[in-house]
């Protein structure tokens, strides 16, 4: 029984990682924001993995999609700064959603989790960009000098709020159609873990 659960988990994580990897290519910029900030919906499969199988599954989907994208697309300097930022963004979004939904496994819990995930992502990425990612971009990509506080307040913070809202809308629409399947899968994983 344990081996079947492990195999099923590996297959599900691989499938959701593949979907997430493909969704990374369907990215688009928002007007008036820096060009390196692009919206994609690749965090949705990771969120589904976390809700169904737990936080480690969601983290693995985030990790695998970024490694695959880095291997496939490369990084301008060989240093995957953007991929590390994408990984951090994903974790800051999916983990609060998972923990709140775990306590309140209904639509209200999902909504609260998505709001918390959006704020966690927006605030967390503002801090991480200030202390790590923007300095790394400047160092490795030779970006010119710019006002980091302005970039964060006018670019990164509002961008991540908009991204969180767009993902929230998509997840809530998907949840309405996939709710029974998600709950069935989650119940099976919980039952088989016991």
Image (tube, rainbow, N blue to C red):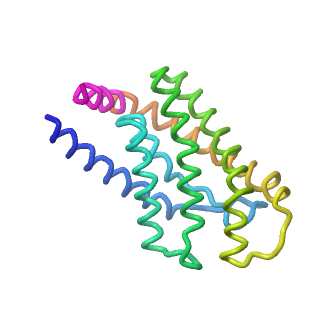
Quadrant where the C terminus sits is top left
Main SS class of the magenta portion in the image? helix
190 inside magenta stretch: yes
Q: Residue at x 56, y 57 (%)?
A: 86
Is residue 157 or residue 167 the one in the foreground? 157
Stretch in magenta: 182-194
Is residue 109 or residue 133 the one in the foreground? 133
3 inside magenta stretch: no
Q: Position of residue 66 (x, y in %)?
A: 47, 61
Quadrant where the N terminus sits is top left
150 with respect to 83 (left or right): right
Using the rendered view, name the quadrant where residue 137 is placed.
Answer: bottom right
22 with respect to 90 (left or right): left
Q: Position of residue 136 (x, y in %)?
A: 67, 68
Q: Residue at x 43, y 61 (%)?
A: 22
Q: Residue at x 55, y 69 (%)?
A: 80
């Amino acid at each position: 029984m344990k081996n079947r659960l492990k195999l099923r988990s590996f297959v599900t994580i691989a499938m959701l990682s593949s979907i997430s990897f493909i969704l990374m290519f369907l990215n688009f910029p928002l007007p008036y924001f820096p060009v390196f900030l692009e919206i994609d919906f690749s965090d949705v499969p990771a969120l589904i993995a976390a809700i169904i199988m737990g936080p480690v599954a969601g983290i693995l989907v985030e990790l695998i999609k970024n490694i695959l994208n880095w291997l496939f697309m490369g990084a301008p300097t060989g240093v995957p700064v953007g991929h590390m930022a994408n990984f951090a963004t994903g974790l800051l979004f999916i983990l609060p959603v998972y923990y709140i939904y775990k306590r309140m496994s209904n639509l209200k819990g999902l909504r609260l989790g998505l709001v918390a995930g959006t704020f966690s992502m927006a605030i967390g990425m503002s801090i991480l960009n200030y202390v790590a990612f923007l300095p790394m971009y400047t160092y490795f990509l030779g970006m010119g000098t710019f006002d980091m506080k302005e970039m964060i307040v006018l670019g990164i913070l509002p961008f991540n709020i908009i991204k969180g809202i767009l993902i929230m809308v998509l997840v809530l629409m998907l949840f309405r159609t996939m709710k029974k399947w998600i709950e069935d899968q989650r119940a099976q994983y919980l039952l088989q873990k016991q």
